[in-house]
Image: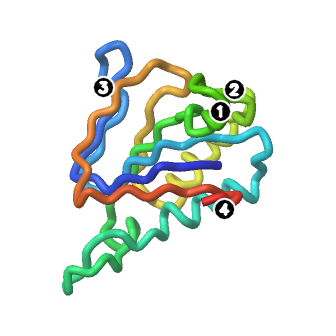
Amino acid sequence: MRAIVQRVEHASVKVDGDMVGNIGKGLLVLLGVGKEDREEDLDYMLDKVLGLRIFQDENDKMNLSLRDIEGELLVVSQFTLYGDVRKGKRPSFSDSANPDYAKELYEKFVDKCREDGIKTETGIFGADMNVDLLNQGPVTIMLDSKKTF
């Protein structure tokens, strides 16, 4: 699994002009599922995202997690995180999971965040979405469950 995690003051996602997800202070997670991903990858990503210490503490150091600040989460599916442009300029998505499998893992990720007590909003899997955010910092972290970066 791959994720782009952005610390936000607020974020929202619209589909066909309708707001489908909206959060205040917290994290926007763009989540991609690879064809080799399994349950262990999901657990790794969940632990990393919810435990990332990227919010300021009382000493102005990045030392607090989403849980610590009782922040909110917006999770948006994004298969293009597996776009490979090492050969040419048109991305290859051959490492992306097939849509049915990707949706299954994406939904499990969201369900586990909610089970953890995190207010979690989403986009619509597979839809053409418009994401709006105010990146605070800016802070943007790239995660990969295979630890390729």
Are the residues at dot 4 and dot 1 in contact (C-beta closer than 8 Å)?
no
Image marks 3 and 1: residues in contact by CB distance under 8 Å: no
* Whether residue 101 is visible: no
- Using the rendered view, name the quadrant where residue 14 is placed: top left
Going by the numbered disc 1, the residue's amino acid type is Lys
Vertical relation: 2 (above or below) 128? below
Task: Provide the residue designation for mark 4.
Answer: 147
Residue 36 badge: none
Mark 2–mark 3 Cα distance, whole angstroms, equals 23 Å
* Relative image position of residue 16 (x, y in whole percent): 35, 13
User: Please, what secondary structure does the residue beneath circle 3 have?
Assistant: strand
Tell me if residue 67 comes above or below residue 71 in the rendering. Answer: below
Disc nearest the viewer among 2 and 1: 2
For label 3, the residue is: 19
Distance between mark 2 and mark 1 Cα atoms: 6 Å
Residue at image x 63%, y 38%? Answer: 82
Neighbourhood count class around disc 1 (C-alpha, 10 Å): few under 14, some 14–19, many 20 upward: some
- Which secondary structure, mark 2? helix
- Quadrant of the frame with the C terminus: bottom right
Q: Determine contact: label 2, label 3, CB under 8 Å.
A: no
The residue positioned farthest toward the bottom in the image shown: 59
Between disc 4 and disc 1, the foreground one is 4
Q: CA distance from mark 4 to mark 2?
A: 23 Å
The residue pinned by badge 1 equals: 103
Rendered residue at 65%/49% (across/down): 1
Q: Choose the circle earlier in sequence order: 3 or 1.
A: 3
Q: Earlier in the sequence, mark 3 or mark 4?
A: 3
Lower position in the chain sequence, tag 2 or tag 3: 3
Q: Image point 32% across, 57% down: which residue?
A: 7
Residue at disc 1, secondary structure: helix
* Residue, far front: 88
User: Mark 1 or mark 4, which is nearer the start of the sequence?
Assistant: 1
